[in-house]
Amino acid sequence: MFFTVIVLAGATLGFRLLGVLGVRRFATWPVSAAHGMAVLLLVTASAHFVPAGTSLPMPAHDDLVAMVPPVIPFPSFVVYLTGVLELLGAAGLVLAATRRAAGYALAVLFVAMFPANVYAAMAVDGATPLWVRTPEQVLFIGVALWATRGAAALPFALPRRSVAG
């Protein structure tokens, strides 16, 4: 039930330990968390592409399609799309130049996917209950945003104008 939190925490701690041991890339907690979130996203995104009937200890594509609220058109496509977006987010978090943009985009993605978590908790038999899903989503949003600390500024940010007095 808490598999994703364990993956995130374990990967983040592992990267930070590498930082303590001298790997400069992981010298800060936010960078270690960015890489830990990337590991988590690789694991969760892979479920979006697992065919039905595969005996892996993870949900398959069809299980995720069942989570999509009926008001969303093309649920199978949406599941594939969110899997691709998670993979792109993972890559973006690992690259220092794109970390800030990726963290913000992932926070938006996690918010956008939350209705599927609510629907699954209420309508899908055997789904993780909402009282577990909600704190997990908040954690993921928080870590995605925290991972942007110290990252390069967004490349499309508008320059600040000085106010002449």
Image (cartoon, rainbow, N blue to C red):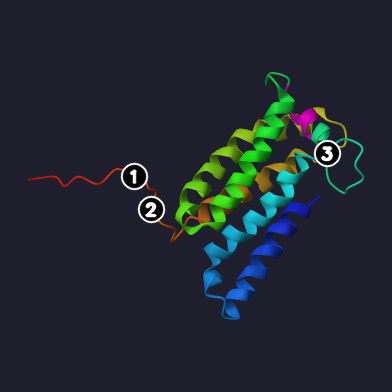
The kind of residue on which mark 1 rests is Ala
- Using the image, tell me which numbered label, if any, was put on residue 60: 3
Q: Residue at x 39, y 48 (%)?
A: 154
Dividing the picture into quadrants, the one containing residue 126 is top right
As measured in the structure, the alpha-carbon distance from the residue carrying label 3 to the one carrying label 1 is: 39 Å
- Amino acid carrying mark 2 in the image: Ala
Image side of residue 102 versus residue 137, left or right: left
Residue 103, how many percent across, how many down?
52, 49
Element under disc 2: loop
Verify whether residue 138 appears in magenta. Answer: no
Q: Position of residue 35 (x, y in %)?
A: 60, 60
User: Dot 3, how many residues are within 10 Å of its Cα: few (below 14), some (14-19), or many (20+)?
Assistant: some
Assess whether mark 2 and mark 3 are in contact (beta carbons under 8 angstroms): no
Q: Which mark is residue 157?
A: 1
| Vertical order, 129 against 33 (above or below) | above
The span picked out in magenta is: 64-69
Asked which secondary structure carries label 3, the reply is loop
Q: Of the residues shown, which amino acid type is indicated by label 3?
A: Ala
- Front residue of 136/63: it is 63
Residue at x 62% of width, y 75% of height = 18
Question: Residue 94 location, x and y as percent?
Answer: 56, 57
> Which image quarter holds the C terminus?
top left
Q: Are marks 1 and 2 in contact (CB under 8 Å)?
A: yes
| N-term-proximal mark, 3 vs 2 | 3
